[in-house]
Image (spheres, grey):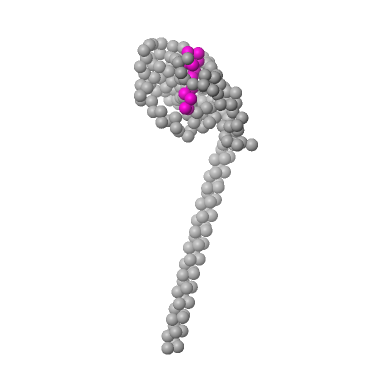
Amino acid sequence: MKNKIIIVFIALICSIAVVLFYRTQFQKQYDQTYAKASESAKDAVEEVKTLVLEGQKLINKKDIKIPKEGQQYANVSIDRVHLDKPVYYGDNESILDIGVGQYMNSGLPGEGRPILLAGHNGTHFNRLQFVEKGDIVKLKTSWGNYEYKVYDIKIMTPEEFDTDCLNDQKEYLIMYSCYPFDQSPAPQRFFVYASLVSGPAIREDVK
């Protein structure tokens, strides 16, 4: 009887030892995996942070005065085609009569979102018809100067333009006018797309 108790006791001790061994091994693997994941995440954050800091000047959003509807806040120019026009916040008819208008639900320069500008085909955006891929578009604002490079030109109907693109978390410039140029009515739209090349980035709580 005594021998049976000893055997059971030894078996119990061995079982506990096995459980503790595997638990320890699992904990080591978990700790190593967590440490690697944390280090990778930290490296990724630092890499992005470095790219932003080295690539763009940062501006505190608190220092930016958001324009009111109808207010001129920028100037748009494309040197090669001799286009140079004032940009107003808003795109109603009275604004488009005096200059280029920005759709108010699109981003401001530096916010990291698409910017949508409109102009009449017979006046303020008439020179848009001569734009080519590779042209540089300049936007001058009170908080900084921005440059965008034309990468695409499209002709489509108003219904074919996908407004969901304005939700993209990437800054690029979209300029459009009625098409054909110098014609009324003009049932189609002429779109110019330009990617951000340079200009300060607007961020929250920049010190």
Residue in view at x 36 percent, y 12 percent: 185
Could you tell me residue 204's position as x and y percent?
58, 36
Could you tell me residue 202's position as x and y percent?
57, 32
Could you tell me residue 5's position as x and y percent?
44, 84
Q: Is residue 207 left or right of residue 110?
A: right
Quadrant, the C terminus: top right
Q: Is residue 42 magenta?
A: no
The residue segment tinted magenta is 95-106
Residue in view at x 52 percent, y 27 percent: 108
Residue in view at x 47 percent, y 34 percent: 169
Q: Nearer the viewer, residue 99 or 38?
A: 99
Q: How many marks?
A: 0
Residue 195 drawn above or below residue 79: below
Could you tell me residue 94's position as x and y percent?
47, 14
Q: Is residue 75 visible?
A: no
Quadrant, the N terminus: bottom left
Q: Residue furthest bottom?
A: 1
Residue in view at x 44 percent, y 87 percent: 3
Q: Nearer the viewer, residue 3 or 199?
A: 3
Q: Residue 177 is drawn in which quadrant? A: top left
Q: Nearer the viewer, residue 48 or 99?
A: 99
Q: Is residue 108 visible?
A: yes
Q: Residue 157 is drawn in which quadrant? A: top left
